[in-house]
Image (tube, grey):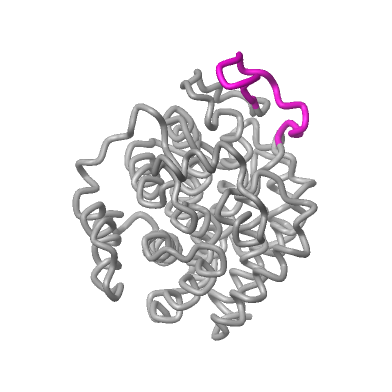
Amino acid sequence: MIAGSVVAEKVLEQATKSLWDEPNSRGRCARSISAALIAYAAGDSFGVSYEYHGEKIPVDTLHIGPRRKRAGENGPLEIDDSWPLGGVSDDTMLSLLTIFAMEKGEASKSGVEFLNSLRTNLPTLRGLGPTTRAALGFELREIEKVMIATGKLVIGNTNGGMMRTALIGLAYDSSEETARREMITELTLATHKDTKAVDCAVLASRLYSDATSNGSENSLISLLNDELSKIQSPTPEVSTGVKNLDRWSPPEEGISLDPLETLSAVYWTVTHAENALDSYRIACELGGDTDTVAALATGLLAARDPIKSGLLEISWLDEVLWSEIPTIGPAISRLLKYRIGG
């Protein structure tokens, strides 16, 4: 398999390219895990141009756009010069930190290691969400205090835990489902204490775990319902949300930081997209937390079918600022080693 992106090709060479063409489970795992991480980082980079504008703007699928911010509460959108073009957000950076903090069979230890790594790498992280910053003892922003007061934000019950642990599912096959749930729970609880946030993180990890084993053979809704049945005392809101997922429709105001709404948006995007590029478009057209939805949804879609997704044929992959995340190749190798050994 030859990547259309020069940089993506280098990532594959560094990690798993030699296994891509093997007609066995090792090759399938290599393709799935590599595609998932490349698609995730690319979706994060692509999606930051469209997040939280207060309005939905046309999506340019030919290039990565600049990150924009609003000048004042009701001012016009302006380019954010502090954010490098093609740069990823905390979504990718925290996901990579989580992968390196995780040690199979050491769930509690892994959670502690993540927090230590988070503090160490704090100067290089941008775009941290309110729950993660609260876990580090940072003061909330005024807008966040208003959101809490009005019930629009609940610290500990946001999508950041699911966002950074979903890829961990790639390291576990179906015979290790109990260990996967324990690991995802501990890694999520390091910053996100709400049960709803943990439930959604566990559910998302199941989708990634199954993608590496079975591709697109199993429907997402059947996987989510099966995983839900194995979670001890899931929150009623998550249970109801999953059971009614086929009737979910995107909110006009865009996707919030709510973990269940984010999981629903990921499901919506993957089930409506024809390929990876279409997935990026759909996720960004939803508005709101577009980088998280684009990363999670397209990472999952690519993991389920790395070749037919057309991921490596996307022309703007080289516009991603891959130099910011040199550990993505080693992260792919680490997940693959956990998944197949060697």
Q: Residue at x 51, y 50 (%)?
A: 299
Number of marks drawn: 0
Residue 139 in sight in this render:
yes
Residues drawn in magenta: 68-86
Quarter of the rendering containing residue 51: top right
The question of residue 72 being in magenta is answered with yes
Picture coordinates of residue 7, whole percent (x, y): 74, 44
Q: Is residue 291 above or below residue 69?
A: below
Q: Residue at x 37, y 42 (%)?
A: 265
Picture coordinates of residue 220, whole percent (x, y): 30, 54
Q: Residue at x 59, y 59 (%)?
A: 20
The question of residue 236 being in magenta is answered with no
**Left or right: residue 232 compared with residue 2:** left
Q: Residue at x 56, y 48 (%)?
A: 40
Q: Is residue 158 above or below residue 74?
A: below
> In front here: 220 or 163?
163
Picture coordinates of residue 106, whole percent (x, y): 57, 84
